[in-house]
Image (cartoon, helix red, strand yellow):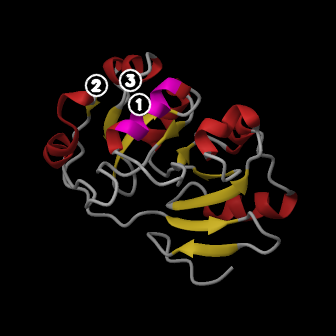
Amino acid sequence: MTSLKLVDALRRGGIAVIPTDTLYGIVARALDKEAVARLYKLRRQTSHKPFIVLVSSLKDLAAFGVRPNATQCVFLKKVWPGPVSVIFRCSSRKSSYLHLGTHSLAFRLPKSRRLVTLLKKTGPLVAPSANREGEKPAETTTEAKEYFGTDVDVYVNGGRRRGEPSTLISFVDEEPRIVRQGAAGIQSL
């Protein structure tokens, strides 16, 4: 997955469809404002729901002004890497194009070593599922091409993907809460 073509395309502001450890994702570099805007337009995203950001390590959160406290770090070390996305407060002005006024962002450290290697080469990636907003997530690159065609720079075939989306946990309020049940199957916090 870490082909030079893929890395180069993403570093140049491109968009790719890649297999993640849950579903196919359509990805762009999170720290590239223009690439993120292009991805919102491509997915026809109309809601003010920020994309999940894939990171290669806990240290990547600092680039977004997010600094988990000691309790949150203990939790993250239990569930990461894995199919758990965690929402944190993110009031950073420079991240406003990502949090869309919600002042929060969700992050996930994937379990796939190939994907983490890619993230180390490209930096954090926004990674919504590979579909138009409100449509069924693509299970194959063929299905993703039906959604996006030549508007995507690189498609990486990882076979059929029928996984569940990540479990979504919020640390925005005082007490953590499960926002969406998903692949991790966490029942309580």
Residue stretch in magenta = 34-41
Mark 3 or 2 closer to N-term?
3
Left or right, 28 with respect to 24, comes to: right
Determine whether 166 is above or below 66 in the image. below
Secondary structure under the numbered disc 1 in the rendered image: helix
Q: Residue furthest front?
A: 46
Task: Rate crowding at label 3 as few (under 14), some (14 to 19) or many (20 or more) other CA atoms within 10 Å.
Answer: many
| Closer mark to the observer between disc 1 and disc 3 | 1
Q: What is the number of the mark on residue 14? A: 3
Q: Position of residue 93 (x, y in %)?
A: 75, 35
From this view, report whether residue 3 is shown above or below residue 142.
Answer: above
Image quarter of residue 12: top left
Say which of 39 and 63 sits in front: 39
**Amino acid type indicated by mark 3:** Gly
In the picture, the quarter occupied by the N terminus is top left
Which quadrant: the C terminus?
A: bottom right
The residue beneath circle 2 is 153
Kindly check if marks 1 and 2 are in contact, taking CB atoms under 8 A apart as contact.
no
- Tell me if residue 22 is in the magenta stretch: no
Determine the main secondary structure of the stretch shown in magenta: helix
Closer to viewer: mark 1 or mark 2:
1
